[in-house]
Amino acid sequence: MMAITDLKILLLAAGQSSRMGKPKQLLPVAGITLIERTLKTAIEAIGEGVYCVLGANAKLIRPIIEDYPVQIVENKNWKDGLGESIATGTAAILKKAPETKGILILLADQPWVDGNYLEKIISHFEDHPDAIIASDYGDFYGVPALFAKANFEQLKKLEGDSGAKEFLNDEAVPVIGVKAPEKLEDIDTPADYQRFLKSPHL
């Protein structure tokens, strides 16, 4: 079985939250912020191997999370899109922990994700350590997704706003899908946020 120390979680929180109108990472959720909720889920899944990429509003977000067991990476080029944040975070992980065998990419605005779902992805990866394990949304693959070492160079070259989505849905790339929970969606707008607050998850 793969040691949990061989895995890292890359939590992406560099976006500007333009559709929300304010930093969604700092929205209150059950007594803590949205980013803290997602960060706690990541820490519960693998312990201290969590890296968080900040960008827009980094000065506001950093004080909220810096006391958690997390490595904070700042993407100065966050305006270049999600792909740039993935590339920056992957490079930071490999510089500090070159022995890493898998990187699980998670978005800060996916509070529907829980520890059980991340553990399911990790379990599939333990059985298929050379594969990409991605969330299966029915008509496409997306994040959370766990990438094998063979894919790290591609992650370091990502750019633009599509992130890893195009890479995951390239027919030439072998992907094992894990059925995503029905409500596994991003929180992008005030309506999304209100819907989440009314959910039974809280």
Image: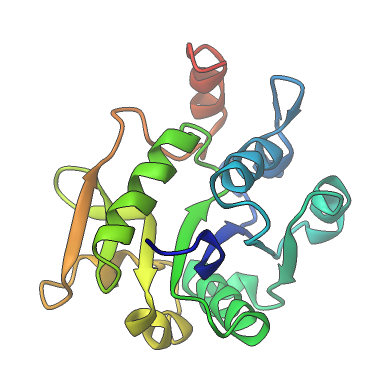
- Residue lying furthest left in this view? 171
Q: Is residue 149 above or below residue 121?
A: below
In terms of depth relative to the viewer, which is nearer, 181 or 54? 181
Residue at left 51%, top 76%?
A: 100
Q: Is residue 70 above or below residue 139?
A: below
Task: Classify residue 184 as left or right of residue 134.
Answer: right
Task: Classify residue 44 as left or right of residue 186.
Answer: right
Residue at left 45%, top 79%?
A: 159
Query: In the image, residue 42 lies at what x, y percent?
Result: 58, 47
Asked where in the image residue 93 lies, by quadrant, the reply is bottom right
Query: In the image, residue 176 lies at what x, y percent?
Result: 19, 58
Query: In the image, residue 38 lies at what x, y percent?
Result: 60, 41
Task: Classify residue 168 as left or right of residue 79.
Answer: left
> Could you tell me if residue 93 is visible in this image?
yes
Task: Classify residue 136 as left or right of residue 118.
Answer: left
Q: Is residue 122 above or below residue 95?
A: above
Q: How many marks?
A: 0
> Could you tell me if residue 113 is visible in this image?
no
Residue at left 20%, top 52%?
A: 177
Asked where in the image residue 125 lies, by quadrant, the reply is bottom left
Query: In the image, residue 114 lies at what x, y percent?
Result: 48, 34
Q: How is the image coloured?
A: rainbow
Question: Which quadrant would the N terminus be assigned to in this image?
Answer: bottom left
Residue at left 51%, top 40%?
A: 188
Question: Which quadrant would the C terminus be assigned to in this image?
Answer: top right
